Each structure stands twice: as C-alpha cells, then as structure tokens.
Amino acid sequence: MSSNGNKTTLAGVLVLPALVLALVGCAGSQPSQMQPSTGATDQPAESGSPTEEETTEGDGDVIMTVGLAFMPETITVEAGTTVTWQNGEAISHTVTSGAWGDVNEETGLRGTETADGLFDHDLARMGEEGDSFSFTFEEPGEYPYFCKPHLTMNAMVIVE
Ligand SMILES: [Cu+2]
C-alpha cells in the first residue's frame, strides 16, 4: 500500500534524479498495466510496442515543469537525443511544439504562439499517469515549444 501516497511538491524539484530512477525502478516491480499475461511465456515486455513511454537511461535530458516554467528553459542536445519532460507540480501543463514570441519583459507573458504539430502532449499532474512525455530529436535545429494554458511557459530545445 501507499505506493503513491507520498506526494512531494517543492521537494520534488530536488529529488528529480531520484524520481526518474524511481520510475525506472517501479517498472520492474509493479505489474504493468497493459500486459496481456497469457501465462504461456514469462518474457519481459520489452519486445514489440515502442509506443510506451520510454524512460531515458543515461543519455536522456530531463526538463521539469516548476513554478509555471520549463526548467531549464533552453537546453542543447545532440541529434538523436531523447528529451523527457516531467511534471513537477500538481497542475497540468502541455508540451506543445511551435514558435512563440512577443514576450512581455515585465510579465513574461508571450504575445504570440504558433503550434506546428511536431508534438503536443497534455502533461498530467505530477504523480498521475501521463505526467511525463518523451520526444526524440533526430534533426538538428531549433525547436521552440510552450505550454498552451500558461503564457509564461515558453522554452526551446536546440539540437546540434
Ligand atoms: Cu503549463
């Protein structure tokens, strides 16, 4: 019991690496939600469906949503890197690719946004299913993205 009982808010920022590791660890010990369990074989569910959220191991970069911001706001990664967004607070966000602009210097609110459809994920509240999202950047370039409901959340992935 109480596998999901200890929700931390501010402390969650500090234990980000541990949180990611915990997610990896849970995959092995918890019964996975959509396993067919035919009983004939007891092979680990690693073959076949790559659509499950992949927890990055080693070379992944993690962006945390904290205080209505993406942290860090700008990251630079090598082509082929899988970036993972992790919701670090008890409100939902989106990770929506597209250009943003006209950011007000005083308020931090963007004035324009243009979703480009590369990715658009509804990031569930921390601790709920879907509270992380991963995307692999194959092509070099600049990838601006934002959170639709929060005009302060404007960020960039630079792929080299
Ligand atoms: Cu948001």
Image (cartoon, rainbow, N blue to C red):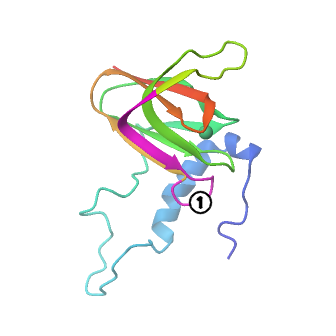
Is the C terminus in the top left, top right, bottom left or bottom right quadrant? Answer: top left
- Residue at left offset 51%, top offset 56%: 130
- Residue at left offset 50%, top offset 71%: 30
> Where is residue 123 shown, x and y percent of the image?
54, 48
Residue toward you, 121 or 135: 121
- Residue at left offset 30%, top offset 22%: 140
The secondary structure type at the circle numbered 1 is loop
Residue 144 vertical position relative to residue 14 in the rendered view, above or below: above
- Per the image, the residue denoted by label 1 is 128
Q: Quadrant of ligand 1?
A: top right
The answer, for residue 91, to whether it is visible in the render is yes
| The residue positioned farthest toward the top in the image shown | 105
- Residue at left offset 67%, top offset 48%: 91
Residue toward you, 158 or 96: 96
Q: Is residue 151 magenta?
A: no
* Three-letter amino acid code at the position of disc 1: Glu
Name which quarter of the figure residue 35 lies in: bottom left
> Where is residue 105 shown, x and y percent of the image?
67, 12
